[in-house]
Amino acid sequence: MRRLMPPCFVLSAAMLLALAGCRSMPGAPVQPIGTVQGSGDRSPVAGTTVWVEGVVTADFRSGDGLGGVFVQDAGDGDPATSDALFVAAAPGIGPLPGVGQRVRLHGTALELDTGDGASLTTLQPLRVEALGTGAMAPATMVAAPYAWEAFEGMAVRIEAPLTLASADDAARRGELVLSFDGPLWEPVERAAPGSADAVALADANRQRRLVLDDGRLGQDLPLDTGPLPRAVARARAGSTLDDVTGVVDHRFGDHRIQLTAPPRLTAAPRPAPPQVAGDTRLAAFNVENLFNGDGRGGGFPSERGARTADEFARQLGKQVAAIRALDPHVAALMELENDGHGAGSAVNALVDALNAGLDGAPWRAVDAGQGPGSDAIRVGLVYRHDRVRTVGTPATLTEAPFDTLSRAPLAQAFVALGDDGRRGGPFVVVANHFKSKGCGDAAGADADQADGAACWNATRLESAQRLHAWLETDPTGSGGDRVAILGDLNAYGQETPVAWLRQAGWRDAFEGHPDAYSYRYDGERGRLDHALLSPALAGRLRGAAHWHANADEPRAAGYRNPDSAGTPWRSSDHDPLLLGLDLAP
């Protein structure tokens, strides 16, 4: 939901007049707006009355707008101070002039709480005098400013191309996350949590990050009625925007540009499914809460996922489109509904949909019996019986922390089939889904350590260690040494769970892929979805890729949008990964 302005935003006219009666100085001279703004985060004259003059550069009073205008003067000669401020519409004062009008204002300077720790220097007017027309050219930016506060309220035009980092909030709030100088990376994807390099990357991200806003505060407003074009609001991350023009605002914890004109978009193309060498393909898909109600077309809304049978049909269709496009022989799945393996289960709904229209019903699911695990969601394995065969029975690990925190892993041994039907040596695929980063009841070592790894990192590390120890026992009894750990580990590439597994001898299938990513959080990209191989299996690796069919797509492209039916785009919030190996005889 679009965030609304806190109720303290507008003071009553009576309160303003009372303040003016206490502090007003009749005949006080007009002062530069820069002296009202000051060079710090808050106005040095907050709570006093001032006289200022300037030109209205943006008007956001109408309907769901911000409730005021921005006024800018010619400057005070100090580059550390902003030359503009927000002027709130106040009852009983009369209408504020529109864009291009020169105005003299007498009012109270206030530092208003605009949510999430942000504040905005604002003038609550007591008197408004129109002075005719005026003009104020926007300041030109070619790089991220050292301090956004020096531009708060000012009209700007950004000539440098900005990279679209996320459009997930475009439909709900009219907001886009942009960045100067290319994409934003999760610091702990590139550097160890808490390290000087990770801190430096986080600081650089904060400076380069910018939110583009449509100047409206309402919820789920029609895109066609604002300055944010529909094509921009639904563009893929990685697209670029030029000629971004608006005023600098500070709300909800972010500096942002409130648009006054539509930007120019260069849309990033959707990528084709990757091709990898090798005779056997393994994949991992987070299917984002694939819940099929009661399994008979009813039972919606369910605990998670689709709210209606129609939504589930679209969700299922998108998963099938994605899996068929990558064409794996074994796929590890995360976030399946944990509802057994019967005819009405979510995993069998997916298998039936994959088999639709195919001769011989080649797709099958590994049946682990109950579970695995007791969480509402579980992992699963599906495979093509015409390309691989299972060996022995599946194995699961349900001891702590896989009993109530991380989801229980599922391991199954397979052999690949040659074109002549001969079988290769056994290999084991393990589907995994470690504890998420949401804090919830996290405490002690699992609390956020302020190092970039978020909450439950200690549990994820313990999960990695116990998984490794379990696999050392050959739980499937296959007797082979070719093992693949696949899935959503909820840890970025340099966080301790993944780093520990590498140190224990597991080989990262994406080593040598510095730009690999599978997920975006708040516009920053990194890998939560991993493929870690035993040395024997790593020697047979021929290719590895993430398909950016999901993480770069806006949330509006997902299954809740009827127009997206039948496409693989935004089939999940995670990108699938694909490996190619030589495993057939």
Image: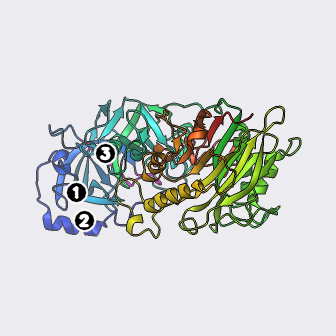
Give how far across and how far down residue 342 sits, in percent.
Answer: 80, 63
Extreme right residue here? 359
Q: CA distance from mark 2 to mark 3?
A: 39 Å
Residue 208 position within the rendered picture, expressed as x and y whole percent measured from the top left: 35, 40
Nearest to N terminus: mark 2 or mark 3:
2
**Which residue, given by chain and number where applicable, does mark 3 sit on?**
203
Amino acid type, label 1: Gly
Label 1, secondary structure: give it.
Answer: strand
Answer with the quarter of the image where residue 373 lies: bottom right
**Viewer-side residue, 539 vs 380:** 539
Q: Is residue 437 above or below residue 511?
A: below
Instruction: Tell me the SS state at disc 2.
Output: helix
Asked if residue 567 shows in the view, the reply is no
Give the colouring mode of the picture: rainbow
Alpha carbon separation for disc pair 1 and 3: 36 Å
Residue 557 image position (x, y, % from top left): 62, 45
- Answer few, some or many: residues within 10 Å of disc 2's Cα (few below 14, many 20 plus, some between 14 and 19): some
Give the residue drawn at x 42%, y 52%: 496
Residue interval drawn in magenta = 61-72
Magenta stretch holds residue 367: no
Res 107 label: 1
- Disc marking residue 289: none
Decide if residue 319 is on the left or right side of residue 99.
Answer: right
Residue at 62% across, 43% down? 576
For the C terminus, which image quadrant?
Answer: top right
Picture quadrant of residue 294: bottom right
Say few, some or many: other residues with alpha carbon within 10 Å of mark 1 (under 14 / 14 to 19 / 20 or more): many
Q: Amino acid at mark 2?
A: Leu
Q: Which residue is mark 2?
A: 16
Q: Is 226 placed left or right of 284 in the picture?
A: left
